[in-house]
Image: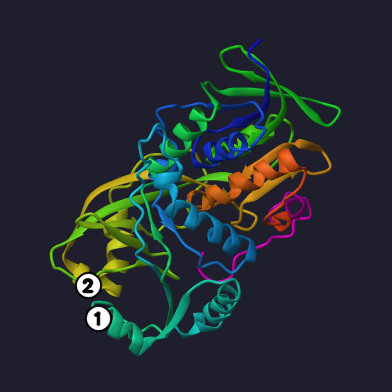
Amino acid sequence: MGQPTDVLVIGGGAIGASVAYFLRARAHPPRVTVVERDPTYAQASTPRASGGVRRLFSGPENIALSNFSIPFYQRFREDMAVDGVPAEIGYRNGGYLFIVPEDGRQALELNVKVQQQHGVRVELLERDALRARFPSMFVDDLAVGAHSLDDGWLDPHSVLWGFRKKAAALGATFVADTVVGIEVDDGQVRRVRLQSGAMLATDWVVNAAGAWAGTVSEMIGMATPIHPMRRFEHYFECQDRIEPLPYVKDLQRLAFRPEGNGYTGGAPTGDEPRSFNFEVDHGYFEQVVWPALAHRFPVFERTREISVMAGLYDQNDLDGNAIIGPWSGRCETFLMAAGFSGHGLMHAPGVGRAIGELILDGAYQTLDLARLGWDRVARNDPYRERGII
C-alpha cells in the first residue's frame, strides 16, 4: 500500500499540474498526488503544443476561461517563482488574427459580438484594412478578419515545469508510475492501483490524462468520445523579411505564429485517424502546409521546413470542447479534465481553479462550467464552437 491521498490526479501535464497547484494553493489544502506515466514528458502533448493563448471563441465558457488564464500567464513569471527564481515562460503579447472569406463573415461577426460582450478587445478588419495592416498577406479571397490585441503565445514546456515546480513546492507529490486500475464502491472512488503494484487510497480522482484520458475512463466503465489525434508542429523560416505577424488562423486550419528567427505552426486535419501515432510524415509540410502558407503569404514561396514534431490532441469527437467535471449520476468523485482538442494549454489555469472549486467548495464559485460537463455527452448533445476553432 502506498501513502493515502485526498486527491489523486492522473496526468502531470499542464492541466494536471495546474489542478495540483490550485488545490495546494488554498488556505487549507488537501493532500494531492499526481501520477505521471512519463516524467520525461517525451510523448506528452503539452511540450508539443503551439503555445497560442487566445480569447477568440464563441462559447462564453471558453472566453471566460481565457479571460482568466491569459492574465494569469502574464503574471506567471512572478507568481510561480520558487525560492526567488522566476518561472519564465516567454509570454509574448503578439495578438491573434482569424481570417475568413465572405461565406465565413456571418459566423465571425457573431463570434466577435459575443467576445466583445465578454470584454474581449477585438476589432473587425475589412479586406482593405487587412491589406493595409498586413501588406505581405494575400487578401483578395478574404472578406474580413478578427484581430484580438491582447492575446499571444508562450513556451509550453516552461509552463508545464513552472506549474509542476510550484505545485511541488506547495506540497503536491509527483509519482512516476502508471495507473492500471481504479476501484469504485457505492459510487465513490476508493483506491487507485499502479503498475508498480502500489495501491493508493483516495477520495477523489481527476482524469487529466490528455490523449490517454479515454483509456483511464475505461478503467471504471466510462466510455468517453475522447481519442488521440496526431498533429504536426512545424518550424520554418523565411528568406525575406516581412512585417511582424500575430498568430494567424484561417478556415482551412492553417495556423502559425512567429517563433525566434522563423515561424511555428501547421495545418492539422480532423480526418487524421485516431491512434497513438507519433510517426512524422515528412511530406506533410510540402504537400499541405507550404501551399497554404504560400497562397496566403506569397513571400513564403521561399521558405523551408527546419524541423517538425508530432504530438497528440485529446480530441473530443463529440464536439471538440473539453469535458470538465464529475461523472454525474455514476461516480461524482471521478472528475474529468480532458478532451480539450488543442485548447488545453491555453485554459489550464482556469480549469485548475475550477476543479479545485468542485473538490474543496462543492460547486463552481467563479465560473460556471456546467455546459462543459458530462451531461451533454450522456445526452449526445454536442456543445460546439461556431466558426474557426
Q: Is residue 64 magenta?
A: no
Magenta stretch, main secondary structure, is loop
Q: Which residue is mark 2?
A: 243
354 or 292: nearer the viewer: 354
The extreme left residue here reads: 239
Residue 194: which quarter of the image? top right
Q: CA distance from mark 2 to mark 1?
A: 8 Å
| Residue 311 visible in image | no
| Range drawn in magenta | 372-389
Mark 2 or mark 1: name the one nearer the start of the chain: 1
Q: Is 245 on the left or on the right of 255, as rendered?
A: left
64 or 298: nearer the viewer: 64
Q: Amino acid at mark 1?
A: Pro
Question: Residue 140, how many percent across, how many down?
Answer: 33, 86
Q: Using the image, determine if residue 186 lies above or below residue 353.
A: above
Q: Residues within 10 Å of mark 1 (few under 14, many from 20)?
A: some
